[in-house]
Structures are given as C-alpha cells and as structure tokens.
Image (cartoon, rainbow, N blue to C red):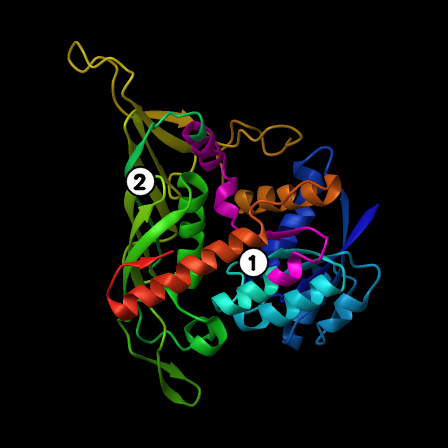
C-alpha cells in the first residue's frame, strides 16, 4: 500500500521532514512502506513553488483540505505551536496517522486534549524527538538498560544555542508567547527533557529558574516586549533516586547546536555531545586502575552511522550528521505505521514532556520545588 503524506506547514522544519521522507527509500532497503508527497498546507503563498519543486502534488492555504483527502493517510505537523491542538485533534478524528514536530502543544491543557483524542483514535501518533535516534544516543540507551552505569548518582544535560544574542534580531513567532506558549524551554528544552527522561526515567520533582535577557525586540510596528524565556535551569530529582541539572539557552555565546549530557553512576559514566556526534564516551569502573592508571579512563565508542539493517546509506563507517537523526526518526515512525507496533516517542511521551515544562514554569514563578 502507498501512503500519501500531507504536510502542515512548510517552513524550515517542513523542509527538513520533507527531505527525510524523500530520503527513506534511498537510505533503507527495503523501506518500511512507500510514501507519496501529496499536499502541503501553508499560510505563505511564497512557499508554494518551493513545495511543488520538492515533489508535492498540490498546495493549499486551507489545512482542512489535507484532512479531507482520501489519498492522504499521514499528516505531518510542522506548524507554529498555537495551531497544534486544533490541527492534531481534527487530524485524529479524520483517521490519519500523525508525525508531529515538538512540542506537542503550547500548554499542558492543550496537550491533554490532544492525547485524550489520540487514545480514542486508533492510528499511529509519534513525536519528532529525533535526538533519540542518533547511533550514540541509541547505544547510550542500550548501555544504561544493560546496567553499564549502575545506580545513577547524578547527571548534567543541556541544549545551547546562541542565535538570539543579537538585540537587533526581530520579533518572531517563537518570541510571541501567544503563538509559542513559551521560550527556550519549549523550543530547545523539550528536546533535552525528552532525552533525559528517555535515558534515565521519570522525574519526581524539580526546582527551576528562567531568565529573559533582552526585554524588547524590533518589529515592523516598533519595539515589542518579549514575554518568553531566553534561559532556563532545572534541578531535577529522578524517581530512581538520582539527581541532576538541565539547562537550555538561546543566549549561550559561542555555541552552535550544542546538546550534551554526562551521566555518572555507581559502575560507570557516559557522556555525549551533539557537536562531536560520532562518538559516545564511556567510563567503566570495571577497568583496572593499576599500575599507573591501568586501562581505566573514558573510551571512545565509534558509533558513527552504525544503524542496523535495512539501513544501507550512508555506510556505517561514515560520519553522522544532524539530518541523519531526523531520517531515522521518521523511518521509525513509518515502521510503526507499517507493522502496527507501538510508537515511541508517542504523543503520551509528548504529554509527559509538556507536563514537565508546565511544572518548570510553575516552579520558576513560585521559586520552589514542585512535584512532577
């Protein structure tokens, strides 16, 4: 069976997901299923020609046209956050499989409404938390499950950008609270929160602070106040007993796309950096430390692009890039659609991240620990 794809939104992430769809039959042999790029719904007419050039058969400014089409079985949501709730709920009711860019919604209440619909929907619904799908993070998950680090004592994890340092950067929907629902916490923090939760389990409680460094931004109608966070720091206690720190910033001067974590446990440690993505660094207490340090120390695990078959391109020895995680994330979703297995990260995972983000804002306002 051929599955038609309808893309909601065709900005940067719409193009990224489109490239991933087009790459699947080249990167995987066989592909989990055959897809056809049917339609794009975009609010911007200047993107129409770009969408057609990318392979879509038609474009529209009315997103409901995609839901009404019988030749579209998959809806891919890459719109601003304020549109997610209505679009996703209606897509679920229309009987579509859904792949959704993060975050699931603007607020916890909106996310709960989406998940309530999904629980009655009967199709496959998955979040695009693509950092779960790099070989190094896939291997880290395996090693933690196998007991390599033992009892987790503490961790530190962050996702850092520097793109908002310039005070002349104009207002955009990501800086508009009514549209985005929040700042760096929803933008970058959702990714690192999901990855920590995926690797280490559920959060028990947290204490957080947020900061907005530039209070006004230029817009076509003059300076506008910024009501969203530029930086967030979260101290976390895990249900398993460990503790740690999560940071997200769009003001980390000198950073590009710097997602990283360090996990310290009773038997070993793991660390990873998205700026050095070919390697997972692992430290084992089982290695001898005598004489003169023995063989103990961090070792590099050459994860590169060692995806399992049916991945055939690029080769397993070649360096991995940012786009590759998106491609494997989408491959995972299409595999669940094809074989009927449970999605992960699911909309339930998206809801769990949304709850943690809501509690983070609650803690920052009250300046206190809150239960998750």
Under circle 2, the secondary element is loop
- Single out the residue that lies furthest toward the bottom: 221
User: Which residue is labeled 2 in the image?
Assistant: 241
- Single out the residue that lies furthest toward the top: 291
Q: Which residues are magenta?
A: 116-144
Task: Tell whether 95 sits left or right of 342.
Answer: right
Rendering coords of residue 61 (x, y %): 70, 76
Figure label count: 2
The residue lying at 55 percent from left, 28 percent from top is: 316
Under circle 1, the secondary element is loop
Q: Quadrant of residue 69?
A: bottom right
Rendering coords of residue 361 (x, y %): 35, 66
User: Which residue is labeled 1 in the image?
Assistant: 101
Task: Tell whether 340 sits left or right of 88.
Answer: right
Say few, some or many: other residues with alpha carbon within 10 Å of mark 1 (under 14 / 14 to 19 / 20 or more).
many
Is residue 234 at all visible to an observer of this figure?
yes
């Amino acid at each position: 069976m051929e599955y038609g794809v309808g893309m909601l939104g065709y900005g940067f992430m719409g193009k990224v997901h489109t490239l991933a769809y087009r790459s699947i039959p080249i990167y995987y042999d066989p592909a989990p299923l055959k897809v056809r790029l049917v339609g794009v719904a975009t609010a911007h007419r200047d993107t129409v020609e770009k969408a057609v050039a990318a392979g879509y058969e038609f474009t529209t400014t009315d997103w409901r046209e995609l839901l009404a089409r019988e030749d579209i079985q998959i809806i891919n949501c890459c719109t601003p956050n304020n549109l997610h709730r209505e679009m996703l709920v209606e897509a679920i009711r229309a009987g579509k499989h859904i792949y959704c860019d993060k975050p699931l919604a603007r607020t916890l209440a909106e996310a709960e409404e989406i998940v309530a619909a999904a629980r009655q929907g009967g199709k496959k619904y998955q979040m695009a938390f693509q950092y779960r799908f790099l070989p190094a993070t896939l291997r880290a998950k395996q090693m933690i499950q196998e007991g390599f680090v033992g009892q987790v004592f503490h961790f530190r994890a962050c996702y850092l950008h520097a793109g908002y340092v310039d005070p002349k950067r104009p207002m955009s929907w990501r800086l508009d609270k009514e549209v985005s629902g929040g700042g760096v916490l929803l933008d970058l923090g959702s990714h690192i929160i999901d990855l920590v939760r995926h690797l280490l389990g559920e959060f028990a409680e947290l204490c957080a602070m947020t900061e907005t460094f530039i209070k006004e931004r230029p817009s076509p109608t003059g300076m506008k106040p910024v009501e969203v966070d530029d930086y967030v720091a979260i101290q976390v206690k895990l249900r398993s007993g460990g503790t740690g720190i999560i940071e997200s910033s769009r003001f980390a001067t000198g950073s590009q796309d710097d997602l990283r974590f360090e996990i310290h446990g009773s038997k070993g440690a793991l660390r990873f950096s998205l700026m050095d993505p070919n390697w997972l660094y692992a430290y084992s207490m089982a290695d001898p430390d005598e004489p003169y340090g023995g063989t103990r120390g961090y070792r590099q695990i050459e994860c590169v692009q060692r995806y399992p078959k049916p991945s055939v391109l690029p080769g397993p020895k070649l360096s991995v890039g940012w786009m590759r995680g998106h491609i494997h994330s989408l491959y995972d979703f299409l595999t669940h659609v094809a074989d009927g297995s449970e999605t992960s990260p699911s909309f339930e995972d998206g809801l769990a991240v949304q709850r943690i983000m809501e509690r983070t804002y609650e803690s920052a306002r009250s300046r206190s620990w809150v239960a998750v």
